[in-house]
Image: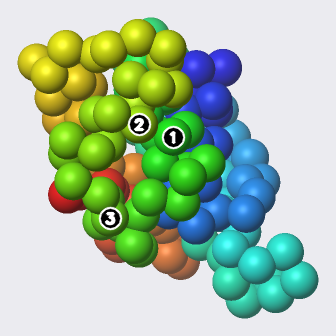
Amino acid sequence: MRRKQFLIEFLGALGAKEIQWQKETDTSISGTVIYEINDPEEVQEFIWHVQEAEAPTEDVRKLAELLNQKHLLSIDKIRVSRHELRNLYSKKLGRIVPENEFIAILETLESIEVPMVDEGKETDVYFIHE
């Protein structure tokens, strides 16, 4: 469940309007990202090789959620400074998040790659960066 919750926010921040889930196993989760609900050509399959227990923490999910809700990405690049993002994140959580804690959360988010699948092969990855 944590994997799905994270992917909804992570892929949503990257432009997903909807996700059609395909398969969940102990070691992976896969589906199709839909970019335009009324355009069947605007889709991308993915598979994420992560066990449920290895899914990102709630703090990382909340940062992805913030990026998604506030539309803070330009394609896959964060559009605001690290300082501004930390302020927005602190406001979302209702507490001042120490800089070292925030950097660890941000770096975790930036380390995540979700492979795209084309014709059954992993071809590229979804990722977020500064």
Q: Position of residue 23 (x, y in %)?
A: 69, 41
Using the image as rendered, state which of residue 83 and residue 102 is in the foreground: 83
Outermost left residue: 100
Tag of residue 88: 2
Image height check: is 33 above or below 96? below
Quadrant in the rendering for residue 74: bottom left
Position in image of residue 50 (x %, y %): 41, 29
Q: What SS does tag 1 mark?
A: helix
Name of the residue lying farthest toward the right:
38
Q: Residue at x 68, y 74 (%)?
A: 35
Dot 1, how many residues are within 10 Å of its Cα: few (below 14), some (14-19), or many (20+)? some
Q: Secondary structure at mark 2?
A: helix
- The quadrant of the rendering that contains the N terminus is top right
Q: Which residue is mark 1?
A: 66
The colour mode here is: rainbow
Q: In the picture provided, is 95 more to the left or to the right than 66? A: left
Residue kind at label 1, given as amino acid type? Leu
**Residue at which label 3 appears:** 79
Q: Amino acid at mark 3?
A: Arg
- Can residue 11 be seen here? no
Choose between 18 and 23: the one closer to the eye. Answer: 18
Position of 109 relative to 102 (above/below): below
Q: Nearer the viewer, mark 3 or mark 2?
A: 2
Q: Residue at x 20, y 45 (%)?
A: 82
Label 3 to label 2: alpha-carbon separation: 13 Å
Label pair 2/1, CB-CB below 8 angstroms: yes
